[in-house]
Image (spheres, helix red, strand yellow):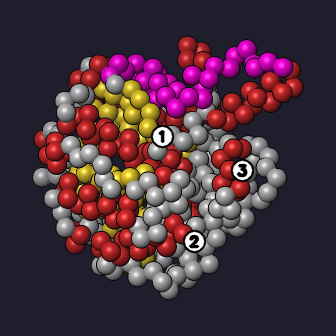
Amino acid sequence: MNGFKDPRLSHLKPVPVTAFTTINGCGLGNSALSQAVLNSRSGLGELTVFDIPFATPVGEIKEELPTIRPELVVYDSRNARVALAALNFAEDGLRAAVEAAKSSFGSDRIGVIIGTSTSGLSETELAYQVLLAEGHMPDDFHFLTRHAYQSTPRFLQKELQLNGPCFAVSTACSSGAKAIAAGQRLINFDVCDAVLVGGVDTLCRLTLRGFNSLELVSSDFCRPMDKNRNGINIGEGAGLLLLQKPALQYRHLPHVLSVGESSDAYHMSSPHPEGKGAVAAMNNALNLAGLKSGDVDYINLHATATPINDQVEAKAVFEVFKDSVPCSGSKGVTGHTLGAAGAIEAIVALLALQDQMIPGTCGLQEIDKDFHCHVVKDSLPNQSLQTVMSNSFGFGGNNASIIFSKDYE
């Protein structure tokens, strides 16, 4: 079930999250996402960046994206621009935090790990249109720097002038969460003093058509955990977090306690019907953090709004937590951002800690009567949260559950 277990992982120390930010369909920055989940305000709407032959709402970014500076134009893609927009959002202070870390530790000690699923696929789609029309690929198209998985983390590394380890993670919808796990390990094993982690994914034709061919796309606004749920809405976005080695001055900041991972490998696109992989990921996270199920105050669900996935996750959460822990899903706000989902939804969990609120489940009208876990429909402000979990379950049984604490004394 869980594969090889490295005994060193049971001794991983929590690491502080010194800055984080996001961009997605509901806006740019943490405040936009926080207000959207608190007020159940959906960022889903009409697709405008290209045409597809069927109707479905999407979580498309509406903000004007920055241009890539000339020295790095070979990396130019929608994915890179979305990542840059998040990085440069001064209000959340991520870029400033990276620069401060670079001054403290040196550029060689700062890594970059980014999860992605589509990467620069949209640019490749356009390039193939030129190939079909003109018989050759565009002269300025470079697969390794615009499409390949490592193109976005490499762009961020060069944009920030860092020299530490740099790689991508692509495990479908758990990619962004697994990037966070990898960052915690690099710091614990003294490979890095700080790691920029997260996920970035952007809309493309192949993803929308592919999920539609699997009959997983809803023609209406998605309804996570609802008895009448009928499919996902695809979104795009970035979630970026800076992890640093523990230090006294960061004890009041949120910390990554653990990331529980599993791989059930039950089916290429369907989870194990009994939720075995999801159960293993959540239990692994609890065990690595030295916690019991009753220590978790809130769970951000993967909650895709597909009939099978929500049913399996509800069953798995109930097996681990019974009905004692409030949980909700945020894809009715952002859409399913695929390779970025694990990072963006981790940020939802961090915002729940920051704002001491339990997000509602946007789109949920009537909970499925077969779900026995404690699903929250409407947001609950003025809570007392210390420890939260965020679930990300990907194709092929690639599962990850992150546990954050409000601080670490």
Residue at the spot of label 3: 209
Which one is earlier in the sequence, the residue at label 1 or at label 3? 1
Dividing the image into 4 quarters, which one contains the N terminus?
bottom left
The local crowd at label 1, few if under 14, some if 14 to 19, many if 20 or more residues have their Cα within 10 Å, is many
Query: Which residue type does callout 1 highlight?
Result: Ser
Instruction: Determine the residue positioned at 68% across, 31% down.
Output: 123
In the image, 46: left or right of 112? right
* Front residue (pair 280, 341): 280
Which picture quadrant has residue 143?
top right
First along the sequence among labels 2 and 1: 1
For the question of whether residue 176 can be seen, the reply is: yes
Mark number for residue 307?
2
In the image, the segment drawn in magenta is 135-164
Amino acid at pointer 3: Arg
Residue position for label 1 = 170
Q: Is residue 5 above or below residue 46?
A: above
Q: Mark 3 Cα within 10 Å, few/some/many (few <14, many 20+)? A: some
Q: Secondary structure at mark 2?
A: helix
SS of the residue under disc 1: loop
Q: Considering the numbered disc 3 on the image, is that residue within a helix, a strand or a loop?
A: helix
